[in-house]
Amino acid sequence: MYMRTMYFEKKEFVIIDGIRYDISNAVQVDMFNCKSAIVEVWNYLQADNIDMARDFNNFGAWKKDLVKLLKEWDKCYVKHMKTSYPEMSANHAKAMLPLTQLIESNLNFHKLELMIANKEDVPEFRFKALEEEFCKFFTGVC
C-alpha cells in the first residue's frame, strides 16, 4: 500500500490533469532513498552478481550481506510510511478524486439499470438524477 508513493520522479512538483501538486524536499529525498535501497537489493540478487560457486563456506556471508541490505530498505520503508506517505497520499487522493467520483456514479447508475432490468419500480427522478451525476463526472474526467 505504501510503496505506490515511493516511485515518483525526484521533482519539486508534479502536474496531474493540469493541477500542480508540490512535493517537499524531505519527501523527495525520502523517495529517492527508498528507491535506491530497493535497487541495491535487486542488484544484489541479479544472476550476474551472484557467485555461482557458492557453497556451505561462503553462503553465510552472502546471506548476511543480503539481510543487511533488506534491513536498510526496511528502515527506509518504515520512515517513508511514517513521514512521506501522508503527504504523497493526500496528493494522490486529490488527483484521483474526479476518477473516484466517476467510478462511484457509474456503479450507482449501473445498479439502477439492473433494478430497471429486473422490473423493479424506479422513480423517474432518480434515473434522471443518477444519469446527470454520471454525465457530470464523465465530462469532468474527459
Image (spheres, grey):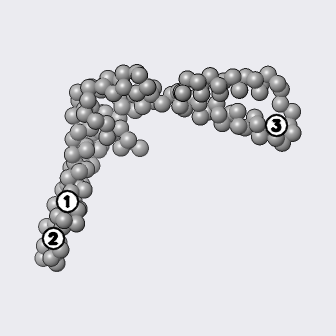
| Residue 80 x, y percent position in the rendering | 29, 38
The residue wearing badge 2 is 51
| Crowd around label 2: few <14 · some 14–19 · many ≥20 (10 Å) | few
Specify whether 31 is left or right of 57: right
65 shown above or below 19: below
Q: Nearer the viewer, residue 27 or 46?
A: 46
| Residue 118 x, y percent position in the rendering | 83, 42
Specify whether 24 is left or right of 131: left
Instruction: Decide if residue 76 is in sight here.
Output: no
Verify CB contact (< 8 Å) between mark 2 and mark 3: no
Q: Secondary structure at mark 1?
A: helix
The residue wearing badge 1 is 44
| Disc number lying in front (3 or 1) | 3
Kind of residue at disc 2: Asp
Q: How many marks?
A: 3
Kind of residue at disc 3: Ile
C-alpha span from label 2 to label 1: 10 Å
Kind of residue at disc 1: Tyr
| Crowd around label 3: few <14 · some 14–19 · many ≥20 (10 Å) | few
Q: Secondary structure at mark 2?
A: loop
C-alpha span from label 3 to label 1: 58 Å
The residue wearing badge 3 is 116
